[in-house]
Amino acid sequence: EVQLVQSGAEMRKSGESLKISCEGSGYSFTNYWIGWVRQMPGKGLEWMGTIYPGDSDTRYSPSFQGQVTISADKSINTAYLQWSSLKASDTAMYFCARRAETTEYFQQWGLGTLVTVSS
Amino acid sequence: EIVLTQSPGTLSLSPGERAILSCRASQSVSSSFLAWYQQKPGQAPRLLIYGASIRATGIATRFSGSGSGTDFTLTISRLEPEDSAVYYCQQYQSSPLTFGGGTKVEIK
C-alpha cells in the first residue's frame, strides 16, 4: 500500500527556520515525483513545487521560487520542504503528494502538516 | 499561467439529485490534462478523475468527468450524503500546475 507519512504540526515565530518531511513507503520512492501543495486557512490548493527523488531534479512554481526549498533524501525515502525565515503568511496546511508516473496529476496524498507562524 | 475558474461556488442539493460542476480554463488544455479532486473537511484531497474523464482506482461510478479544450465538467449522478465536500479541478498541461478555486457541494 502506498503511503505518504508527513511530520507533525509545527508552531514557530516569524523569522525562524523550519523543515517538514514526507516519508514514502509501499512503492519505489526514487521513481515517482513528489509535489508539495499549500492550503491556507479556508482557501484552495496551490502547487509549490515538485522533486524527483531519484536525482533531486526540482521544479518550483514561480510564486514559491526563492521562498522555500524542496529537497529529498532517497536513502531514507523522505522529501522535505523548508523555510529559512518564516512569515506569518506562511501559516497553512502543507500537503505532500505523489505524482503519477509519467504525468502531473497527484495520485496519493499525505495527511498534511499544519504550520502556524506567529508574529 | 493557465487560470481555472470553477462554478458555482456552492451547490446545495438533496440526496439522489445530480450535481454538475464546471471548470473553465483561460486557455485550451490539450490532451485532456485535467484532473478532479475531492476534499472533505479536515482531510487531504483525493483524486477522483484524471485525463478529464478517467476514474481513478476505487472511485464510485456515479462520478464522471467530461469536456475538452477550455470547458470541463464533473458530474455526480446521484448524490449521497458522503459526497459533501469541496471539489477542485487541476490542469497539468503546463507549468505552473494550477488548481481551480473549488466548488463546495452541500447535501440538504
Image (tube, rainbow, N blue to C red):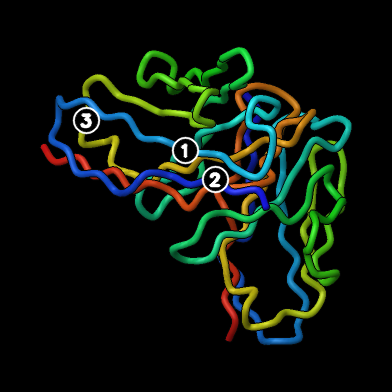
Q: CA distance from mark 1 to mark 2?
A: 6 Å
- Between label 3 and label 1, give the one nearer the viewer: 1
- Give the secondary structure at mark 2: strand
Q: Contact, CB < 8 Å: mark 2 with mark 3?
A: no
Asked whether the viewer can see residue B9, the reply is: no
Q: Earlier in the sequence, mark 3 or mark 1?
A: 1
- Between label 2 and label 3, give the one nearer the viewer: 2
The residue that disc 1 covers is: A22
Task: Give the residue type that dot 3 points to.
Answer: Lys
Image coordinates of residue B61 in percent, x first then y, are: 85, 69
Q: Is residue B75 left or right of residue A34?
A: right
Q: Earlier in the sequence, mark 2 or mark 3?
A: 2
Q: Contact, CB < 8 Å: mark 1 with mark 2?
A: yes
Q: Is residue A33 left or right of residue A5?
A: right
Query: Which quadrant of the figure contains the N terminus of chain B?
Result: top right
Q: Please tell me if label 2 and label 3 are on a single chain.
A: yes
- Give the secondary structure at mark 1: strand
Residue A87's disc number: 3
Q: Quadrant of residue A25?
A: top right
Q: Is residue B71 left or right of residue A19?
A: right
- Chain under disc 3: A
Image coordinates of residue A102 in percent, x first then y, are: 79, 28
Asked whether the viewer can see residue A33, the reply is: yes
Query: Which quadrant of the figure contains the C terminus of chain B?
Result: bottom right
| The residue positioned farthest toward the front in the image shown | A75
- Chain under disc 1: A
Binning the other alpha carbons within 10 Å of mark 1 as few (below 14), some (14 to 19) or many (20 upward) gives many
Task: Give the residue type that dot 2 points to.
Answer: Leu
Task: Give the residue type that dot 1 points to.
Answer: Cys
Residue at position x 57%, y 54% in the image: B45
The residue that disc 2 covers is: A4
